[in-house]
Image (cartoon, rainbow, N blue to C red):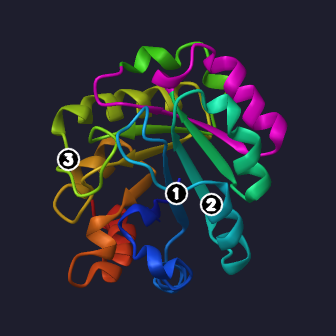
Amino acid sequence: MSLKVAPSLLSADFSNLREEVKRIEANGADWVHLDVMDGHFVPSITIGPVVVQSLRPQTNLFMDAHLMVSEPEDHIEQFVSAGADLVTIQAETTAHLDRALRKIKKAGAKAGVALNPATPAAVLEYIWPLLDLVLVMSVNPGAGGQSFIPEVLPKIAYISSQIERRSLNTELEVDGGVNRETAPAIIRAGATVLVAGSAVFKAEKGMALIGDLKNMQNVL
């Protein structure tokens, strides 16, 4: 599976999101990652479906909506209707994970589950057939610019081995502290989608990182 890069708009210039999306697309991004925060599951509040709806006509990029919200079932259909291609929910936010994933698929989007750094991969055991993506959080969700937590690397490798053993086409995404220094170990562990925010939008030569990350798979 070829490596994909999904810049996170959490670190973008919110006064100019249209142009920010066009910039990452022009620099080779595969997906655009949308961090949705509700001020409850995480302290911050970010974007809602209206932002997704406004950006959808502006880009052909695959839209990856990560719902860091309590009771995500109440919001799934709105994000899919707004144009999200993939909706990922946090395993910790619902007592009915199977039902929530089925609701995403019924709405017409791909379905993903995100695991916080301390959440074990065992959560996935009985929902593998429903998963188009597993997102391993390599920072605690709620803010951009955090440092990568290296203790998640064995979890990434384990999930990658499970995907391979089951012959699944499930993507394995990693989000948090992804940059030139941390990416090689993440890729070696088996990640297929890299989310990068601050390293793309706030660092010098950040846009060049998109191509650099994609090229890493060929040299590791």
Label 1 sits on residue? 34
x then y, percent, for residue 138 = 28, 41
Decide which of 190, 118 is in the foreground and name it: 118
Residues in magenta? 91-119
Residue 116 is one of the magenta-drawn residues: yes
Question: For this view, does 74 lie left or right of residue 17?
Answer: right
Residue 156 is one of the magenta-drawn residues: no
Decide which of 156, 15 is in the foreground and name it: 15
Question: For this view, does 175 lie left or right of residue 185?
Answer: right
Return the disc, 2 or 1, that comes first in the chain's sequence.
1
Question: For this view, does 76 lie left or right of residue 168?
Answer: right
Q: Secondary structure at mark 3?
A: loop
Q: Amino acid at mark 2?
A: Met
Residue pictured at 68% horizontal, 80% vertical: 58
Q: Secondary structure at mark 2?
A: strand
Q: Are marks 2 and 1 in contact (CB under 8 Å)?
A: yes
Residue pictured at 38% horizontal, 43% vertical: 190
Distance, label 1 to label 3, CA atoms, is 19 Å
Image height check: is 107 above or below 91?
Answer: below
Decide which of 61, 18 is in the foreground and name it: 18
**Mark carried by residue 63:** 2
Return the disc, 1 or 3, that comes first in the chain's sequence.
1
Residue pictured at 32% horizontal, 82% vertical: 208
Q: Amino acid at mark 3?
A: Phe
Q: Name which quarter of the figure residue 212 lies in.
A: bottom left
Q: Name which quarter of the figure residue 42 lies in.
A: top left
Image height check: is 186 above or below 106?
Answer: below
